[in-house]
Amino acid sequence: MDVKIRKFRVGARFGRLVIIELDRLKAKCKCDCGEEKVVLRSNLSSGTTTSCGCYAREQTIAKSTKHGMRGTRTYNIWANMLQRCHNEKHPAFERYGARGISVCERWRESFAAFLEDMGPCPDGLEIDRADNELGYFKENCRWATRTTNNRNTRTSKRWFIDGVEYPSCSAAAKALGKGRNTIMEMAKSKPGCFSEKKY
Protein backbone atom coordinates (compact mmCIF):
# COMPACT_ATOMS: atom_id res chain seq x y z
CA MET A 1 0.00 0.00 0.00
CA ASP A 2 1.27 3.47 -0.90
CA VAL A 3 2.60 5.26 2.19
CA LYS A 4 1.12 8.62 1.14
CA ILE A 5 -2.34 7.14 0.69
CA ARG A 6 -2.13 5.39 4.07
CA LYS A 7 -1.43 8.75 5.73
CA PHE A 8 -4.80 10.12 4.70
CA ARG A 9 -7.05 9.02 7.51
CA VAL A 10 -9.09 10.82 10.14
CA GLY A 11 -6.75 11.78 12.95
CA ALA A 12 -3.62 12.01 10.78
CA ARG A 13 -1.50 15.08 11.44
CA PHE A 14 0.17 17.32 8.85
CA GLY A 15 2.06 20.10 10.58
CA ARG A 16 -0.50 21.96 12.69
CA LEU A 17 -3.45 20.35 10.89
CA VAL A 18 -5.30 17.21 11.95
CA ILE A 19 -7.71 15.58 9.50
CA ILE A 20 -11.31 15.40 10.76
CA GLU A 21 -13.10 14.56 7.47
CA LEU A 22 -11.97 13.16 4.12
CA ASP A 23 -13.15 12.94 0.54
CA ARG A 24 -11.38 11.90 -2.66
CA LEU A 25 -9.55 15.18 -3.27
CA LYS A 26 -9.87 17.23 -0.11
CA ALA A 27 -9.53 16.98 3.63
CA LYS A 28 -11.28 18.99 6.30
CA CYS A 29 -8.74 19.71 9.00
CA LYS A 30 -8.67 21.26 12.43
CA CYS A 31 -5.69 23.44 13.19
CA ASP A 32 -3.93 23.51 16.55
CA CYS A 33 -5.25 27.08 16.97
CA GLY A 34 -8.86 25.81 16.74
CA GLU A 35 -9.68 26.96 13.19
CA GLU A 36 -11.06 24.51 10.64
CA LYS A 37 -9.89 24.53 7.03
CA VAL A 38 -10.60 22.49 3.90
CA VAL A 39 -7.33 21.62 2.17
CA LEU A 40 -6.40 19.75 -1.01
CA ARG A 41 -4.92 16.39 -0.11
CA SER A 42 -2.07 17.07 -2.52
CA ASN A 43 -1.17 20.24 -0.58
CA LEU A 44 -1.03 18.26 2.63
CA SER A 45 1.16 15.51 1.24
CA SER A 46 3.53 17.99 -0.41
CA GLY A 47 3.81 20.11 2.73
CA THR A 48 2.48 23.20 0.93
CA THR A 49 -0.21 23.66 3.59
CA THR A 50 0.66 22.98 7.22
CA SER A 51 -1.71 25.32 9.09
CA CYS A 52 -4.97 27.23 8.65
CA GLY A 53 -2.97 30.38 8.01
CA CYS A 54 -2.07 31.10 11.63
CA TYR A 55 1.59 30.32 11.01
CA ALA A 56 1.73 32.99 8.30
CA ARG A 57 -0.01 35.45 10.64
CA GLU A 58 2.52 34.73 13.36
CA GLN A 59 5.33 35.36 10.89
CA THR A 60 3.69 38.64 9.88
CA ILE A 61 3.46 39.66 13.52
CA ALA A 62 7.13 38.83 14.00
CA LYS A 63 8.08 40.89 10.93
CA SER A 64 5.85 43.77 12.03
CA THR A 65 7.50 43.71 15.42
CA LYS A 66 10.91 44.02 13.77
CA HIS A 67 9.64 46.97 11.77
CA GLY A 68 8.37 48.71 14.89
CA MET A 69 4.65 48.46 14.12
CA ARG A 70 3.69 46.35 17.12
CA GLY A 71 1.94 48.47 19.72
CA THR A 72 0.82 51.21 17.33
CA ARG A 73 -2.88 52.10 17.24
CA THR A 74 -3.26 50.74 13.69
CA TYR A 75 -1.59 47.45 14.61
CA ASN A 76 -3.77 47.05 17.71
CA ILE A 77 -6.94 47.67 15.67
CA TRP A 78 -5.83 44.96 13.22
CA ALA A 79 -4.99 42.49 15.99
CA ASN A 80 -8.27 43.09 17.85
CA MET A 81 -10.22 42.73 14.61
CA LEU A 82 -8.69 39.28 14.07
CA GLN A 83 -9.36 38.21 17.64
CA ARG A 84 -13.05 39.13 17.82
CA CYS A 85 -13.74 37.46 14.46
CA HIS A 86 -11.59 34.33 14.71
CA ASN A 87 -10.92 33.59 18.38
CA GLU A 88 -13.87 31.83 20.06
CA LYS A 89 -12.52 32.79 23.48
CA HIS A 90 -12.61 36.54 22.74
CA PRO A 91 -15.36 38.35 24.73
CA ALA A 92 -16.79 39.92 21.55
CA PHE A 93 -16.69 36.73 19.44
CA GLU A 94 -20.43 36.12 19.87
CA ARG A 95 -21.21 39.47 18.21
CA TYR A 96 -18.70 38.97 15.38
CA GLY A 97 -17.27 35.56 14.50
CA ALA A 98 -20.22 33.62 15.85
CA ARG A 99 -22.61 35.42 13.50
CA GLY A 100 -20.39 34.98 10.46
CA ILE A 101 -18.37 38.19 10.50
CA SER A 102 -14.84 37.36 9.34
CA VAL A 103 -11.68 39.10 8.20
CA CYS A 104 -10.71 38.60 4.56
CA GLU A 105 -7.83 36.20 3.97
CA ARG A 106 -5.56 38.98 2.66
CA TRP A 107 -5.82 40.84 5.96
CA ARG A 108 -5.81 37.72 8.13
CA GLU A 109 -2.44 36.71 6.78
CA SER A 110 -0.75 40.08 6.53
CA PHE A 111 -0.75 43.21 8.66
CA ALA A 112 1.25 44.83 5.85
CA ALA A 113 -1.63 44.18 3.44
CA PHE A 114 -4.12 45.70 5.91
CA LEU A 115 -1.89 48.76 6.27
CA GLU A 116 -1.50 49.04 2.50
CA ASP A 117 -5.27 48.94 1.96
CA MET A 118 -6.39 51.14 4.85
CA GLY A 119 -3.39 53.31 5.66
CA PRO A 120 -2.54 54.29 9.25
CA CYS A 121 -5.55 55.02 11.44
CA PRO A 122 -6.05 58.81 11.69
CA ASP A 123 -6.23 60.27 15.20
CA GLY A 124 -9.68 60.03 16.73
CA LEU A 125 -11.03 57.47 14.26
CA GLU A 126 -11.65 53.72 14.39
CA ILE A 127 -12.43 50.98 11.88
CA ASP A 128 -16.03 50.74 10.69
CA ARG A 129 -17.87 48.48 8.24
CA ALA A 130 -20.15 50.23 5.76
CA ASP A 131 -22.44 47.17 5.64
CA ASN A 132 -22.71 45.76 9.15
CA GLU A 133 -23.83 42.36 7.91
CA LEU A 134 -20.60 41.83 5.93
CA GLY A 135 -17.09 41.17 7.14
CA TYR A 136 -13.84 43.09 7.14
CA PHE A 137 -12.39 43.71 3.68
CA LYS A 138 -11.13 46.78 1.82
CA GLU A 139 -14.35 47.67 -0.01
CA ASN A 140 -16.46 47.43 3.16
CA CYS A 141 -14.19 49.21 5.63
CA ARG A 142 -13.35 52.82 6.42
CA TRP A 143 -11.90 54.92 9.20
CA ALA A 144 -14.80 56.60 11.01
CA THR A 145 -15.57 58.55 14.15
CA ARG A 146 -16.97 56.77 17.19
CA THR A 147 -20.30 58.53 16.61
CA THR A 148 -20.55 57.24 13.04
CA ASN A 149 -19.51 53.77 14.16
CA ASN A 150 -22.09 53.68 16.95
CA ARG A 151 -24.85 54.76 14.59
CA ASN A 152 -23.90 51.98 12.19
CA THR A 153 -24.75 49.04 14.46
CA ARG A 154 -27.42 46.37 14.08
CA THR A 155 -29.24 47.81 17.11
CA SER A 156 -29.08 51.44 15.99
CA LYS A 157 -32.47 53.08 15.55
CA ARG A 158 -33.31 54.66 12.22
CA TRP A 159 -36.11 57.22 12.32
CA PHE A 160 -38.67 57.28 9.50
CA ILE A 161 -40.68 60.50 9.44
CA ASP A 162 -43.17 61.14 6.66
CA GLY A 163 -41.29 58.68 4.48
CA VAL A 164 -37.88 60.27 5.10
CA GLU A 165 -35.21 58.25 6.91
CA TYR A 166 -32.94 59.90 9.49
CA PRO A 167 -29.96 58.17 11.12
CA SER A 168 -30.87 59.39 14.62
CA CYS A 169 -33.42 61.28 16.66
CA SER A 170 -31.00 64.22 16.81
CA ALA A 171 -30.65 64.27 13.02
CA ALA A 172 -34.43 64.28 12.63
CA ALA A 173 -34.78 67.06 15.18
CA LYS A 174 -32.17 69.17 13.43
CA ALA A 175 -33.68 68.63 9.98
CA LEU A 176 -37.20 69.47 11.17
CA GLY A 177 -36.19 72.32 13.47
CA LYS A 178 -37.61 70.62 16.56
CA GLY A 179 -36.19 69.45 19.88
CA ARG A 180 -35.28 65.80 20.50
CA ASN A 181 -37.98 65.48 23.13
CA THR A 182 -40.55 66.78 20.66
CA ILE A 183 -39.49 64.21 18.07
CA MET A 184 -39.70 61.44 20.66
CA GLU A 185 -43.17 62.53 21.78
CA MET A 186 -44.36 62.71 18.19
CA ALA A 187 -43.02 59.22 17.61
CA LYS A 188 -45.09 57.94 20.52
CA SER A 189 -48.27 59.81 19.67
CA LYS A 190 -48.26 59.32 15.90
CA PRO A 191 -46.71 55.94 15.16
CA GLY A 192 -48.12 56.04 11.66
CA CYS A 193 -46.03 59.08 10.77
CA PHE A 194 -43.18 58.93 13.22
CA SER A 195 -41.64 55.56 13.85
CA GLU A 196 -38.42 53.84 14.82
CA LYS A 197 -37.01 50.80 13.09
CA LYS A 198 -34.29 48.62 14.59
CA TYR A 199 -31.75 47.26 12.13
Image: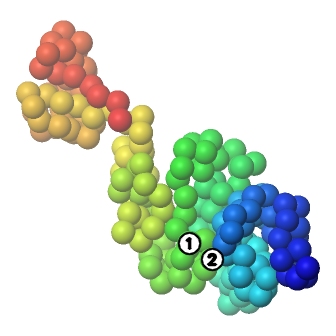
Q: Which mark is residue 105?
A: 1
Q: Secondary structure at mark 2?
A: loop
Q: Marks 2 and 1: in contact by CB < 8 Å?
A: yes
Q: Say above or below: 131 vs 51.
A: above
Measuring from the top left, give residue 63's x and y in whole percent.
Answer: 71, 87
Of the 4 image quadrants, the one containing the N terminus is bottom right
Query: Along the horizontal axis of the image, is 46 left or right of 129?
Result: right
Q: Give, as a three-letter code, the residue at label 1.
A: Glu
Q: Give, as a three-letter code, the residue at label 2.
A: Glu
Q: Say above or below: 15 vs 102.
A: below
Residue occupying the point 42% across, 48% down: 133
Q: Secondary structure at mark 1?
A: helix
Closer-to-camera residue (171/151): 151
Residue occupying the point 66% across, 66% down: 38
> In this figure, which residue is indicated by the disc labeled 2?
109
Residue occupying the point 41% across, 49% down: 132
Of the 4 image quadrants, the one containing the C terminus is top left
Q: Which mark is residue 122?
A: none
